[in-house]
Amino acid sequence: MSEVVSSALPETRRTWLQRGLLALPAALAGCATTSTSALGFSARKSRAQWEYHNRFLASGARLRFRSHSAHGRPWTASMEQTYRAYRRDPRIGYAVKNLATGRYLAEFQADKLFLGGSMPKPAVAAVLLEKRHGNLTREEFQNIVYACDQSINASWYYMLARITQADEQYFERKYSLPDVQIINNWQSPRFYAEFYERCVNYRLDYGCELLLEAMRRDQYGLGRWVIPASITYIGGKTGNYGEWDHESLFFYHRNTPYAIVLYTRGNFAHGNQLGCMMGGLFRDFCA
C-alpha cells in the first residue's frame, strides 16, 4: 500500500481547464468565499463542483480509479445469524444515520473512542483543505487521493505534517463535530457519521466533492460486498491495526443518503463479522 503512482494529467486537459471551459458561471465563482451556512443544498453542491474543477482538476492532480457500486452478494442465513449474535458485542460500536433527516436510526456505543487505524485519513484531508481554504498544490491534492483510495500511509504522514492540533480543533468547532482526536487517531462512530453527513450534504466550505469522489474509489472493505448492487453511489473508509478493525460507508438508497459506521477492537474481525455487521445494519435500518 506504499506505492506512489505518477499522477500528471495530459497537458491538453490541464490547458482546457485553465481556460475555464469546465468552470461554472462567474457569478458562482464569487461564492467560493461565502460560508456554506448561507447557501441551500443545490448552491452548496454547485460551489463544491466548481471548486473541484477549478482547483483540484486544474492543479493537474487526478483520481486514479473508477468509482464502483455495491456488489450485491447474496445475504445468507449464516450471515444473518452472525449479525444477530454480535450486534451487542462489547467490543464494537456503531452508528447508522439518515443523512437527509439527521436522525440516528441505530447506535451502540456510538460515542466510545477507538484507535482508528487508517480511518482518520479523509478527516485529516478535510482539516488540511479547511486550513488552506481549498488552495492546495497539485502534490497536496494528489496525496489526498492516495490517502483515500488505497490508504497510503506515506500520504497520511505527508498531510499530518501540514496541520496542527489548533487546526483540528478549529475544524471540529466550526462544523459542530464531536470533539475527538483526529490527529492522534482516536475517533468514535458518531464522529464519522457526522463527518459523512457534512460531506454528503456539502456542508464543508472546502473539498466536499473531492473527498466524496476520492472515498467512492476506496479499494478496500467488506461492507460493499453485501449491500445491494442497485446502490451505485457509495463510498467510505476502512481502518485496521493490530486488534482494531473498522468499516464505514455513505451511500444513497432509494434517493435517501445514509451512513453506517462500525468500529471494533479485540480482534473482532477474525472471520466475516465486519461484513455481516454492515449488511445486517443495512437490512435492519436502511432497507
Image (spheres, rainbow, N blue to C red):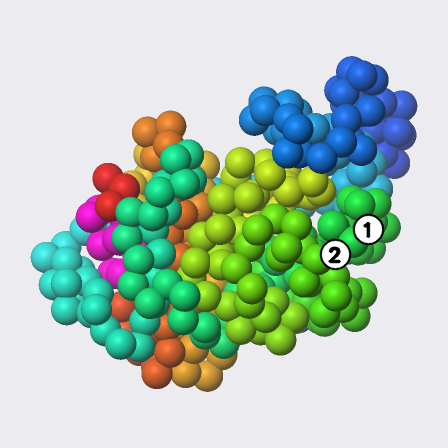
User: Residue placed at 17% from the left, 66% from the top?
Assistant: 82
User: Residue placed at 53% from the left, 73% from the top?
Assistant: 186
Residue 136 horizontal side relative to residue 222, left or right: right
Residue 164 horizontal side relative to residue 70, left or right: right
Quarter of the picture holding the C terminus? top left
Residue 202 horizontal side relative to residue 99, left or right: right
Percent position of residue 166, x then y: 75, 66
Predominant SS along the magenta part: helix
Real-space CA distance between mark 1 and mark 2, rounded to the nearest whole angstrom: 6 Å
Percent position of residue 9, x then y: 80, 41
Above/below status of 140 relative to 50 = below
Q: Amino acid at mark 2?
A: Leu
* Label disc, if present, on residue 33 of the rendered structure: none
Give the structural element (helix, strand or loop) at label 1.
Answer: loop
Q: Is residue 127 magenta?
A: no
Give the structural element (helix, strand or loop) at label 2.
Answer: helix
User: Residue placed at 37% from the left, 72% from the top?
Assistant: 264
Q: Which residues are magenta?
A: 276-284
Quarter of the picture holding the N terminus? bottom right
Above/below status of 230 relative to 134 = above
The answer to whether the residue labelled 1 contacts the one labelled 2, judged by CB atoms less than 8 Å apart, is yes
* Label disc, if present, on residue 128 of the rendered structure: 2
For disc 1, the marked residue is 132
Percent position of residue 117, x then y: 53, 73
